[in-house]
Image (cartoon, rainbow, N blue to C red):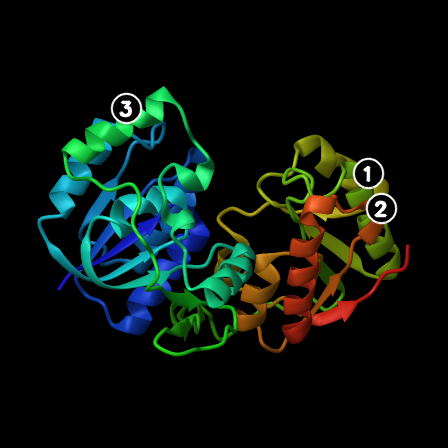
Amino acid sequence: MKSIFFIRTSLEMLGAIEARKQFGIVDTLLIIKSDRRQDSTISFLIEKSGGWNNIIRTKKKTSYGVSWLKLVKKLKKEKYKYLFTRAFPIASYFVNNLNYEKLYILDDGAATIAIAKEYKNTGDLTKRFSLFKGKNKVGFKYDLIQKIYASNKIKIDENVTDVNFFTFYNLPNYENHEYVQNNFTWLHSLKKDSKKKENNKVYLIGTAVVNSKILLFEDYFTTLKRISEFYRDKEVVYIPHTREASKDLKLFEKELSFKIRKNKFNIELDFLLNNEYPTHIIGTISTALITLKGIYKESVIDFFNFDDTKIFKNKKKDVVDVYKYQEKYINYIRLDY
């Protein structure tokens, strides 16, 4: 029986590859809705992992309309073993309409922690899998789309209470639901016997806290300055998040003496494909810190806190939750401000 994977980012594509490997899935349907920044990495991963015989790429510019209606109606004609997807509104097309045996949520960075906590507390992820409610979209346009979909028997809302997770985070099992640990089986298979180790380098993982409105740029810069002082005797290689601005990276290079190294694909793949073994990795809040710990178990991985008084109030709890989670698995070095 066929299984469906719906992905939008390279992180989700990695999750899909690992799930396919660990679950022993042979008959697959891969559905992709990515933006152009993700396209090259996703295409590389598809080619590198092989065996994705059924691939559908949806339109980039729209999440509604005739193309989606036709796609869902076509997919509804079959039965599926598993559905793997991230917990976000557009996945409602598949979660609420297709005939599958089991739903598994793929990792969505640090948001996975909040999603798992929400599900554990409420047993309900209906709003996250609602096409419009999850984004608070209301008005004539959305009412019209809903009526057209309803006339074609396409649901945009349905109770979502039976959920499982495939995750690299260490989340607890509880009755009738599964948290299947992502063991990075496929990524480990890319490792080569000979590895370049550079003990005087510290790899600093960038994060999109400014773009995500968690901190102002000057406050993020202050944290990076403290980190640079902490490792003044080391070469700090800064690996930026894709959403960090070029002008900001130039400032880090000039003022903090960071060596900027942009990823060709993504951080996990780049280390492996360059045959590098990073001995010391640092950061603040980043999914990559956890994934890299899973891949490079012998590496030293540290993380640092922001100035708590500078974190935007509506994001403070989320940041603290990430701190608490990261502290379980990687070293926490607390900075005083």
- Image quarter of residue 142: top left
Tell me which label, 2 or 3, sits earlier in the chain: 3
Query: How far across and down, in percent of the image, does residue 302 sit?
Result: 72, 67
Residue, x 65% and y 48% (percent of image)?
Answer: 207
Q: Is residue 28 above or below residue 192?
A: above
Q: What label sits on residue 144 in the rendered view?
A: 3
* Quadrant occupied by the C terminus: bottom right
Residue at the disc numbered 1:
218
- Residue 52 visible, this angle: yes
- Distance, label 1 to label 3, CA atoms, is 45 Å
Query: How far across and down, in percent of the image, does residue 110 sit?
Result: 56, 57
Residue at the disc numbered 2:
222
Residue 322 lies left or right of residue 258; in this view the side is left
Q: Nearer the viewer, residue 155 or 281?
A: 155
- The answer to whether mark 1 and mark 2 are in CB contact below 8 A is yes
- Farthest residue, direction right: 337
- Distance, label 2 to label 3, CA atoms, is 49 Å
Tell me which label, 1 or 3, sits earlier in the chain: 3
Query: How far across and down, in percent of the image, does residue 224 sit?
Result: 80, 50
* CA neighbours of label 3 inside 10 A, class few (<14), some (14 to 19), many (20+): few
Q: Nearer the viewer, residue 138 or 287?
A: 138
Amino acid type at circle 2 is Thr
